[in-house]
Image (cartoon, grey):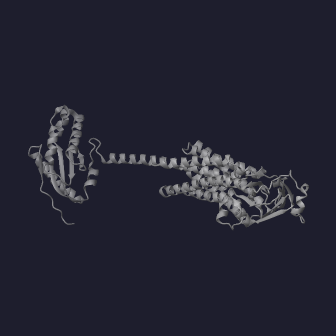
């Protein structure tokens, strides 16, 4: 089948993406290096880095950061003892919503190095995986501690997520593995988009635009959530990139749900399920738009509504799959597998957001991977549907051809019937020869060997005609024992050849069967031409009968008259 090759390509893309995910999961990526535990203190007037480095008791280490709400904070790392061996170190943490952050590094000689980054500078220092990173200068003294001053933190999941100290080698290794992962995701999305754009142009099914929209949004989300967007637009504020993340992920989910609703058979998606799907899309879309337009105002409220909206949207998939199972949908296995990972990871991510679970790099980045897997498997479902449609089309064509043959064919002899014969003969340019053949004494044949024997005689004569005439000649049984032939170019002895073949044909019970043939040449452009040619050939046939049968007679050619 022509669709086997695309399906194999999609299967190969799926295997490649799974291997990339497995390799990246086994490698150390994202929060690489030495983990730093942080204690928190809410900012207050008069607090400075010099004072706080020497007052670690003022920091709270047991209180979960997410419970403190938004605002400005100081965060202090555990005591460090990093030797000054010439190794360059980077302070890394996962990107979060904040207005600005200053990193203070305390060295054993009492020196404090401060590095400030505002919202735009945060984008300029993003690494793959949306990891914020600043390099510390090389110093001759040991690194003792790190202190962060965070301004305008939304503190949705934490003030500072997964802070680490990493070497250049660890940073390069993490970037390499994440580049392979995000490139694999982006390549898969681009390949699926191009493949399905071609299918959308060819098939024009209503579900294809939603799938292509999902792929475009997923490709854009891959660029934004990975931090690549900040590389392309280095002057974009990091909070603007996070707003884009919210909108793109919502667009991916909404278009995926719309694709699912339009892909299943009409009997699966009931009016109630359609209304639930629209409500689910709105429950995700409104908080995303609210964050994009109004954040940081009511950001925590919008983020909570966004998480609940996602849970509702994913929950709305379940009754669709259940109804597909009840209605015995042919596409259920694909979507059951395709939506299992997105639902599982989205539930984990929403639970992490709602219940303040500890940060996990892979859960935080699970959306792009799980939705890509969903898109891959959904594309396999599209290929499967195209295969089914192709089979249905081929079967319909075969049935149509069979029905047409039955309508145009004489059921006894397999020759054309009168209607099909006239449709093929009349209306052609040039002159043609019409042969009218009639079996001699056919009534006597039926009386001698019975009607079944007579039918066999008719079949043998039809076979004799096909064997004696060139390929492509129009041959028909006009009715009873009368046959007609229309041919453009033929030798003068063609009628005699037919009669000779008939004389030597073996008939039932070895009876002798002969025929008489009348022929005439003339135009066949109009219905009137056919009638005139038929009358002349029929008159010639009558002359052959009158002359003793088992012979052919010709009529004078008819001339073409101007219309």
Q: Against 480, is 151 above or below?
A: below
How many numbered callouts? Answer: 0
Q: Against 447, is 435 above or below?
A: below
Percent x, y for residue 365? 68, 53
Q: Point out the image quarter for the C terminus.
A: bottom left
Residue drawn at x 24%, y 38% is 455
Residue drawn at x 16%, y 37% is 444
Between 224 and 284, the residue placed more toward the observer is 224
Q: From where the camera sits, is residue 377 visible?
A: no
Residue drawn at x 12%, y 56% is 556
Percent x, y for residue 123? 71, 64
Left or right: where 420 falls relative to 557: right
Left or right: where 271 falls relative to 165: left
Left or right: where 6 falls relative to 450: right
Residue drawn at x 59%, y 42% is 326
Q: From where the camera sits, is residue 46 visible?
A: yes
Residue projecting furthest to the left: 547
Between 274 and 45, the residue placed more toward the observer is 45
Percent x, y for residue 333? 58, 43
Left or right: where 76 falls relative to 88: right
Residue projecting furthest to the bottom: 235
Between 436 and 195, the residue placed more toward the observer is 195
Rendered image quadrant of residue 296? bottom right
């Amino acid at each position: 089948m022509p669709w086997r090759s695309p399906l194999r390509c999609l299967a190969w893309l799926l295997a490649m993406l799974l291997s990339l995910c497995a390799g990246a999961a086994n490698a150390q990526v994202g929060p690489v290096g030495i983990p730093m535990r942080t204690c928190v203190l809410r900012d207050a007037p008069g607090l400075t880095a010099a004072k706080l480095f020497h007052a670690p008791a003022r920091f709270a280490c047991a209180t979960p950061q997410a419970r403190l709400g938004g605002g400005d904070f100081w965060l202090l790392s555990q005591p460090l003892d990093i030797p000054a061996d010439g190794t360059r170190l980077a302070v890394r943490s996962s990107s979060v919503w904040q207005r600005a952050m200053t990193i203070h590094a305390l060295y054993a000689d009492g020196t404090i190095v401060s590095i400030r980054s505002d919202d735009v500078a945060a984008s300029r220092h993003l690494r793959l995986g949306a990891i914020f990173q600043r390099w510390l200068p090389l110093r001759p003294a040991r690194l003792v501690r790190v202190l962060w001053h965070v301004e305008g933190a939304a503190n949705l999941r934490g003030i500072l997520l997964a802070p680490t100290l990493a070497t250049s080698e660890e940073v390069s290794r993490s970037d390499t593995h994440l580049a392979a992962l995000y490139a694999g995701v982006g390549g898969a999305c681009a390949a699926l988009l191009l493949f399905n754009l071609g299918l959308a142009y060819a098939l024009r099914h209503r579900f294809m635009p939603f799938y292509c929209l999902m792929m475009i949004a997923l490709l854009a989300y891959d660029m934004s959530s990975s931090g690549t967007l900040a590389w392309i637009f280095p002057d974009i504020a990091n909070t603007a990139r996070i707003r884009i993340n919210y909108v793109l992920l919502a667009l991916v989910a909404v278009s995926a749900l719309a694709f699912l609703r339009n892909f299943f058979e009409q009997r699966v998606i009931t009016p109630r399920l359609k209304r639930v799907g629209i409500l689910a899309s709105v429950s995700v879309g409104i908080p995303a738009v609210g964050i994009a337009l109004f954040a940081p105002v009511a950001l925590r409220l919008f983020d909570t509504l966004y998480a609940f909206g996602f849970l509702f949207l994913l929950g709305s998939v379940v009754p669709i799959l259940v109804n597909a199972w009840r209605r015995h949908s042919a596409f259920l296995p694909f979507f059951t597998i395709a939506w299992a990972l997105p639902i599982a990871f989205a539930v984990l991510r929403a639970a992490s957001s709602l219940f303040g679970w500890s940060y996990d790099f892979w859960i935080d980045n699970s959306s792009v991977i799980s939705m890509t897997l969903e898109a891959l498997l959904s594309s396999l479902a599209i290929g499967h549907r195209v295969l089914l449609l192709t089979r249905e089309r081929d079967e319909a064509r075969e049935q149509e051809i069979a029905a047409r043959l039955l309508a145009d064919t004489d059921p006894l002899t397999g020759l054309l019937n009168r209607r099909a014969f006239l449709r093929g003969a009349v209306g052609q340019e040039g002159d043609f020869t019409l042969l009218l053949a009639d079996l001699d004494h056919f009534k006597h044949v039926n009386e001698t060997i019975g009607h079944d024997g007579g039918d066999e005689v008719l079949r043998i004569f039809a076979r004799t005609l096909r064997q004696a005439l060139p390929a492509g000649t129009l041959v028909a049984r006009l009715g009873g024992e009368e046959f007609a032939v229309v041919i453009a170019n033929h030798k003068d002895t063609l009628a005699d050849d037919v009669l000779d073949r008939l004389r030597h044909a073996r008939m039932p019970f070895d009876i002798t069967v002969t025929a008489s043939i009348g022929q005439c040449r003339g135009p066949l452009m109009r219905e009137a031409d056919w009638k005139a040619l038929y009358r002349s050939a029929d008159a010639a046939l009558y002359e052959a009968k009158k002359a003793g049968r088992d012979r052919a007679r010709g009529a004078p050619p008819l001339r073409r008259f101007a219309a």
